[in-house]
Image (cartoon, rainbow, N blue to C red):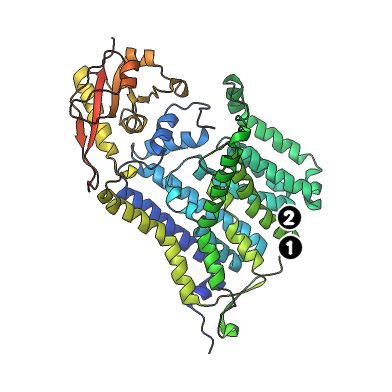
Amino acid sequence: MRFTSLVVELIRARPRLVVWLVVLVQAALWLLLPMLLYRSPPGDLATALAFGREYQVGTWLGPPLAFWLTDIAFRAAGNHMFGVYLLAQVCAVVTFSIYYQLARAIVGGQQAVLAVLLSMTVVAFSSPGVEFGPLVLARPLWALLLLHSWQLIGQNRRNAWFAWSIEAGLLLLITPAALGLLLLLAGFAVATARGRRVLMSLDPLYALLVIAVLVLPYLIWLLRADALAMPPWPAISDLGARALHWGWLLVGLVLAISAIVLLAILNSGWFARNAGEAPIIYRPPVDPLAREFVYFFALAPALLGSLIAGIFHLDHVAGGAGVALLMSGLAVIVASGDLIHLRRQRLLRTVWAGAVVAPAVATIAATLFLPWTANEVPTSLPAKAIAQFFGDNFERRTNHRLRAVAGDPQLASFIAMNRGRPHLLLDTTPERTPWLSIAKFNETGGVVVWRASDTSGTPPPDIAQRFPGLVPEVPRVFEWMVNGRQPLLRIGWAIVRPKQ
């Protein structure tokens, strides 16, 4: 007797419901975990908040839109990180919702669910998705661009041009990798007969006009800042090291989709018994152009992004792993054929659930157990307590609101999250924070912080040189979320009093 599980029946009867259920559950998981475990923002999120607070048209971090939205979400939540974490998960939900629409247009609703389920196991969509920024915000925009590009090229829907142009302009305001992604879209259109036919009209010219209007302020900033230039090419002697770096980036991408590979192997018919009894997920025949579209955008962003990152020695794939691997699940589904047999259903469900939950378990284990190995967990720093202590002490001693903070970039960015939102000064590279100079800092006053190694709190020589006459205070000691075997966090500090 053939047995079909409830999950398979739901995929067949209510595919959209299944997508929303799994996507919302994953978003809730990664909204809840940071609220419970993170006492400080992950990665460079605190720095992004400090830069977003200034509402600059452009900075050394890149286009401004992601940083503006970070500050807006933070303020809307009452200067709480909940707003930023929520915004990151909204991006994840929107990305998979649009991805499902694209997959449904190519392989039908039932197999589109499988594409979404596979893509959810990609590591980039788990814990890295908590750190809102350009790499996270680019994902829904890239999904929208792919959807509307297919509607233009594959379905000849001219009304998609306006939305496509707005999305392209916004993507250019999010990540420097946007230009390369748009060139990939243009290259695919030029390389196909139907794509060239779409381009042979006035609609692309109107789209370029809309894009130019959107990016004009940022383009003017690039010209004025003399930042419209390619990064320096590596020397010949460095090519070997850069090629090795590219190789490691490719290995990282392969590891990120390892769960997809494992699920595909487990579902194969090589070692299956009673294969004829396995339930089948059916789709209509796939358009040959759609097959080319999916394979191209499953491979090209990953290869090109990793190559650019390898050449210019970037620490991540250009555009981010979430953009590079977005189409990986759909590519596996397209390659699987019109009839997909779901063999070993219980094992597939277990492996899929494990792949989705494993990053959360790893995050919990790192937070609770890594301090016992005397290693520091960056998200365990008490950012709120640090910001409140130095903000309150400056106000009590000077009768002025804290307006600026400098010193250790990580600690200073935490203090910049205080309720008064003081300006951040990167005193080692003041050109990166043009809204504040060291001379202006000495005039308006502020707090200088550093990590103290002893109870005297003597500032490091480089800080003492940039801020002559500093009178260090007694270092302030803070506890970690889990102290473990690591020493307490000791912060040296000094007040620069306003000259007024």
In the rendered image, the vertical position of residue 470 relative to residue 154, given as above or below:
above
In the rendered image, the vertical position of residue 76 relative to residue 291, given as above or below:
above
- Image disc number at residue 352: none
**56 or 445, which is in the foreground?**
445
- Say which amino acid is labelled 1: Asp
Q: Gap in Å between the C-alphas at discs 1 and 2?
A: 9 Å
Instruction: Tell me whether circle 1 and circle 2 mark residues in contact (CB < 8 Å).
Output: yes
Residue at the image position 47 percent from the left and 34 percent from the top? 67
Q: Residue furthest top?
A: 500
Q: Visible in this render: residue 82? A: yes
Q: Which residue is mark 2?
A: 154
> Under tag 1, what secondary structure?
loop
In the rendered image, the vertical position of residue 262 relative to residue 46, given as above or below:
below
Q: Visible in this render: residue 117? A: no
**231 or 418, which is in the foreground?**
231
- Image disc number at residue 287: 1
Locate residue 470, reporting x and y percent. 26, 16
- Say which amino acid is labelled 2: Gly
